[in-house]
Amino acid sequence: QPLLGATEIRRLAEEIGVRPTKTLGQNFVIDGNTIRRIVAAAKIDPTETVLEVGPGLGSLTLGLLDAAAKVVAVEIDPVLAAKLPSTVAAFRPALAGNLDVVLSDAMRITELPAEPTALVANLPYNVAVPVVLHLLEHFPSLQHGLVMVQDEVADRMVAGPGSKTYGVPSVKGAWYSQMRKAGVIGMNVFWPAPKISSGLVEFTRREPPVTHASREQVFAVIDAAFAQRRKTLRAALAGWAGGAVEAERFLRMAGVDPSARGEVIDVNAFARIAEAKNPLLV
Ligand code: SAM
């Protein structure tokens, strides 16, 4: 099945007068082989409903329609969202009925016309991490996925404790899923070409850590720990705990060394620290 190349993408953009904007992270894939690679890496079962964020001019959407039973595409740009059904009707007439286009901000959306089991997207780079976390939180039906993000963001998402790139995206991502890097994509497969390489991140949902603390409470500890990542946890969590003495006590209750830094502890330890502040619930 033909996919969209540079000529088709430029023609489609011209037809609707689209000039790609940086603010919306609009870099369109103009290379069929890259689309085939993303779709293969996403390991989509033919019975699945796939959620795509930011379908743009439809490069990835066509590949996803070939692989899945249904695609729900959430696009924030009204001109792109309005064009997508006719592009799909032109290039995949038999599959046009399998597409739902939703005009919405993926960072705020809380309802979809179907229950997707997979998320596959070439994400707008400036909001990639908040979009993934928002969707994993609000759509428990999502079991796995593959997203393309800025390569250095990919490294941060998949990092484990002790690694230089371990931080808020890694720990919050680990709350919901196991994340793994699935490849690097060069700049010249996009129009316009970005200035940096992209990375593929594959994820599989996992159960969050067992804890009496709420997700919000755990995330507050993570934010506090990494707001001052050079500091020891005793110092970094003083504000959150109500003082350094309290912080030290909660850390010891959680079995975490108060002189350690946030970058060496895993999501389960963050959950234990949050729980220690609320002993009545334990
Ligand atoms: N999927 C297309 C491709 O691979 O060629 C386009 C990818 S482009 C990197 C990102 C797309 O996300 C753009 O179409 C942009 O308009 C859209 N977008 C940006 N912010 C968004 C948001 N908050 N919610 C939904 N879509 C968004």
Image (cartoon, rainbow, N blue to C red):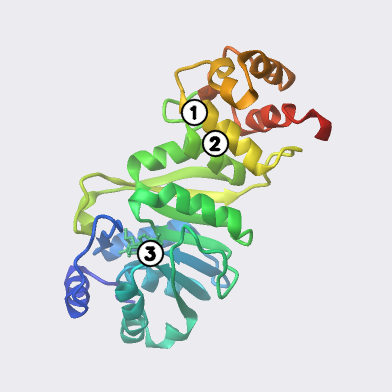
Lateral position of residue 148 relative to residue 186, left or right: right
Secondary structure beneath dot 3 equals loop
- Label at residue 226: 1
Q: What residue would you read off at disc 3?
A: 54
- Which quadrant does the C terminus fall into? top right
Front one among 94 and 212: 212
| Residue in view at x 38 percent, y 46 percent | 183
Q: Is residue 71 visible?
A: yes
- Which quadrant does the N terminus fall into? bottom left
- Amino acid type shown at disc 2: Val
Secondary structure beneath dot 2 equals helix
The residue mark sitting in front, 1 or 3, is 1
Say whether disc 1 or disc 2 marks the residue closer to the N-terminus.
Answer: 2
- Amino acid type shown at disc 3: Gly
Q: What residue would you read off at disc 2?
A: 171
Q: In the rendered image of this protein, does residue 189 appear above or below residue 75?
A: above
Packing grade of label 3 (10 A; few <14, some 14-19, many >=20) is many
Contact, mark 1 vs mark 3 (Cβ under 8 Å) = no
Q: Label 1 CB, ligand 1: below 8 Å?
A: no
Quadrant of ligand 1 in image: bottom left
| Image coordinates for residue 262, horizontal then vertical, percent | 54, 24
Give the spatial CA distance, label 1 vs label 2: 10 Å
- Amino acid type shown at disc 1: Phe
| Image coordinates for residue 207, horizontal then vertical, percent | 68, 46
Give the spatial CA distance, label 3 vs label 2: 25 Å
